[in-house]
Image: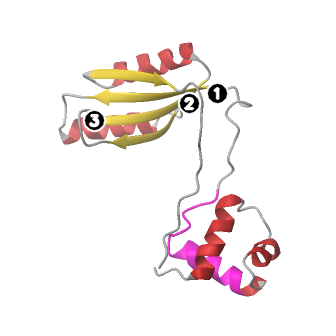
Amino acid sequence: MVLDQLDRKILAVLQEDAAQSLDEIAQQVASSKTPVWHRIRKLRESGVIKRQVALLDNEKLGLAACFFVLVRTSEHDAAWQQHFLETLLARPEVLEAHRLAGDIDYILKVRVRNARAYDDFYQALISEVKIFNVTALLSMQEIKSTTSVPIPEG
């Protein structure tokens, strides 16, 4: 899908606060309500807008500890990968999981209450899936966290 300048403006506004009314969005992008509504509908139908969610405050929910978990495995067959994927998808503590190129096979972003809760997660993970090596890194301070992506020009 080719995005024009109005589409990019709408997407930028929605990334900041998708709960705004159509009138508020239209005002911010210097357009009227009906064209903005049609654009948003088109962006949803094309899959550019995947879904709308509420962003929650981890600290207020008692999830103060963020760990980045580096996983190395000696297993690389399809059955192991499928089992590992299913295990990760079933764990609500895993906010992100990425398969990497290089010495580390996977990196996970895990959000829990504290170190004891991380250890519970770790023990469950290694009991479910055979893993060669796991390294956990505790985030001491979140410097930047955003769900907004840069919207490329033309």
Q: Residue at x 76, y 78 (%)?
A: 26
Question: In the rendered image, which residue does mark 3 sit on?
Answer: 105
Whether the magenta-drawn stretch holds residue 49 is answered as yes
- Residue drawn at (80%, 77%), measured in percent from left and top? 27
Label 2 crowd bin: few (<14), some (14–19), many (20+), radius 10 Å: many
Q: Is residue 147 above or below residue 103?
A: below
Determine whether label 1 and label 2 are within 8 Å by CB.
Answer: yes
Mark nearer the N terminus (1 vs 3): 1
Q: Could you tell me the amino acid type at mark 3? A: Asp
The type of residue carrying mark 1 is: Leu
Q: Which residue is mark 1?
A: 63
Distance of mark 1 from mark 2, alpha carbons?
6 Å
Give, as a three-letter code, the residue at label 2: Arg
Residue at image mark 2: 111
Q: Residue furthest top?
A: 116
For residue 65, which quarter of the picture?
top right
Whichever of labels 2 and 3 marks the residue nearer the N terminus, that label is 3
- Within the magenta stretch, is there residue 113? no
Who's the residue at 53% across and 67% down the image? Answer: 151
The residue drawn where x is 72% and y is 60% is 17
On screen, residue 152 above or below 142? below
